[in-house]
Image: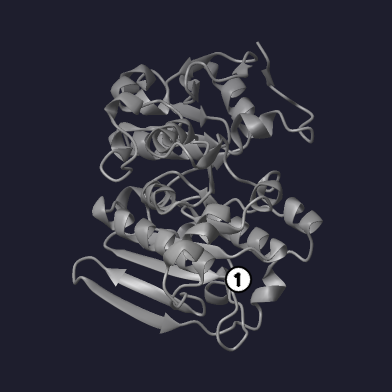
Amino acid sequence: MGFGNEGQQKLNSASVLVIGAGGLGCPALLYLAAAGVGKIGVVDGDVVDISNLNRQVLYGESDVGKSKVGVAVERIRQKYYNIAVEGYEQFIDNSNAIALISKYDVVLDCCDNFSTRYLVNDACVLLNKPLVYGAIYQYEGQVSVFNVQDLNGIAHNYRDLFPDPPDAGQIPNCNDTGVLGVLPGIIGTLQATEAIKLIVGLGNILCGKMLYYNLLDQRFNELAIDKNPVSDQKIPASQIEFQDRDYRITCAAVKNIDWDKALEMFFLNPELTAFVDVREKDELPKIEAVPCLALPLSSIAQQINCLLPYENVLVFCKSGLRSDKAVMQLQQADPFRKYYSILGGIMNNLSPNNNKPYAKEV
């Protein structure tokens, strides 16, 4: 069939959730909006960093330090006034994934870490939501459509390829996995294309197969995905089980520590141990039980000299993702100091299950 008015009406009636407003999410958002998708959601808890600008095409230098979601929503609304755009300035996790994903017809996985990838895959299977997957590594990219039946009536998911998450030691050093900015642009655009085709019913969807792209050779290859007999056993059996599962995986280059261990380390050697808050300066709550240095991720590279008096640096943010990024930056600049990222960040510190909260609203 052709596209025509009927196809445009289907797009206008459809809703798409984009998870991640980075290198993949930016081009996907632009082309979904340009195509006329009626409702678009974007979820990401990160802020714009100067290092993002070579590949995250929605942002400019004046946006550094601002919420990615906030800027992305504003840009899309400026270009396309008649599209409903909903922004969620938070990281997707066990507590909000089901509620967020259930509101939309199609989900795009534009994330940049294994933890989120497995979590989103499992949530989409539980909710029976089509998932358009994209990933990049150095000069290569991948695209597929999961949780949609192929010609044989089989619906594949990410765990058919990789049933179990990798161990931390199997994840490449995050400092060595940079990409050319055009690569996420290509892969994110392909994700938007698959979402549009899926909504409209146009052409052949990438379900039951994986599309591989090599930037150096300008070559596309397509491989069939076999149903893995253990994949469904790896997915939580219910939403309750999903919410109880720990999806956290971190790059092997980052040392993690929990709040109790961090406090213990500080009180053993307070003169040579520093807590570093890499959130933006207006983010709440603040830590008041111990002294903290406020060094936002967006400018931490320029303030590294502040850490010279310390042997141990304990880094935290809202959820743990920005602190991981900060630790990687700091280790690259100064590999001789001990840097730790505090698991779960402030959100974990304030969890109802944490009987020793050290952060308070101030």
Asked which secondary structure carries label 1, the reply is: loop
Q: Is residue 218 above or below residue 35?
A: below
Q: Is residue 7 above or below residue 309?
A: below
Residue furthest to the top in view is 362
Residue 170 placed where, x, y %? 46, 62
The residue under the point 50% across, 64% down is 6
The quadrant of the picture occupied by the N terminus is bottom left
Q: Is residue 348 left or right of residue 186?
A: right
Question: Label 1: which residue?
Answer: 147
Position of the C terminus, as image quadrant, is top right
Q: Position of residue 280 (x, y in %)?
A: 47, 22
Judge from the rendering whether residue 358 lies leftward or rightward of residue 209; answer left or right. right
The percent coordinates of residue 135 (x first, y second) are 41, 61
Locate residue 230: give its quadrant: bottom right
The answer to whether residue 135 is above or below residue 150 is: above
Q: Nearer the viewer, residue 326 or 142?
A: 142
In the orientation shown, which residue stands out farthest toward the left? 217
